[in-house]
Image: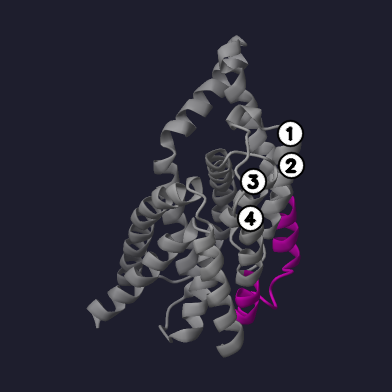
Amino acid sequence: MFFIDLMKYLFLGFIQGFTETIPVSSSGHLMIFKHLINLNIDFDTLAIITNFGSLIGIIILFRNDLIKLIKSFFSYLTTKDKKYKNDYKYCWLIVLGCIPAGLVGLIVNKLELFAKIDNNVKIVGLSLLITAALLFMIRNYKGKKKDYDITWKNALMIGCFQILGLFPGISRSGSTIVGGLTQDLKRDTAFKYSFMLYIPMSIAATALEIGDLFGKSITGITLLYYLLSAFVSMIVTILVTKWFREVVNKGKLIYFVIYCAIVGSLVLIFM
């Protein structure tokens, strides 16, 4: 029984890690599996913990960029040295890009606007089709702007696209990369900025959700399952995000268009 239960958690940790950073919606896939298989698992708690695992994975993957940005931000504040100014500006563009989804997210959470549709798997199917349509529209976009060419208008527009990621089943990474490409960002620039937005947004979401865990009774063995699933999610997130970056840079988003269109259609028809 221990082995079977462990494999359930490891499998879902793998699904979370594999789908978190690619434009197919990790929460949507967990919901699909929740409806397909009766695993007798607290999916809400598992989602919080495995999301945290993915967050740690992304921080590890972008650690050099994060360290450089943080150092440059405080160095510019204290010295006003122009060599730090571009990174200082980029930090504020990250903050600016988080504001639209941050404000809308607080309102959605406070008013529980998605409460009635949060477990509706048909919504996931529709959301996957929307994601497929968005990715199809920008599949050939290349863009010209690099990291330091991003303007405050670009940041706000990408931040508005990130609002789409709040909707159950719509990929956050997909919506922000789409937003970046529509703002004439180079593919890798859009990819990097998308994940620079992901980190503070994910930290904020985890902070809001972590309080829910304190009211739950989690046994020692279940805690072990959660920790192992989070570890799997972290490792898989790192590996998949590296692969996804190559896919974006090669302009192969059509793979995800096809996948989202097929899975979304199957969900709407059969579930």
Report the amino acid beneath label 3: Leu
| Cα–Cα span, label 3 and label 4 | 10 Å
Q: Residues within 10 Å of mark 4 (few under 14, many from 20)?
A: many
Q: Please tell me which residue lies in front, 72 or 259.
A: 259
Query: Residue 82's x, y, as percent?
Result: 60, 11
Give SS at disc 1.
helix
Query: Residue 256's x, y, as percent?
Result: 52, 63
User: Does residue 28 sit above or below 147 in this rendering?
Assistant: below
Query: Residue 259's x, y, as percent?
Result: 51, 70
Q: Which residue is mark 1?
A: 152
Q: Which residue is mark 2?
A: 156
Q: Is 136 part of what is drawn in magenta?
A: no
Please tell me which residue is depicted at 45% across the width and 68% down the height of the picture: 46
| Cα–Cα span, label 1 and label 3 | 15 Å
Please tell me which residue is depicted at 64% across the width and 53% down the height of the picture: 138
Tell me the mark number nearer the camera, choosing from 1 and 3.
3
Question: In terms of image quadrants, where is residue 165?
Answer: bottom right
Q: Which residue is mark 4?
A: 175
Report the amino acid beneath label 1: Trp
Give SS at disc 3.
helix
Q: Which residue is mark 3?
A: 181
Q: Which residues are magenta?
A: 103-127
Please tell me which residue is depicted at 49% across the width and 63% down the height of the picture: 255
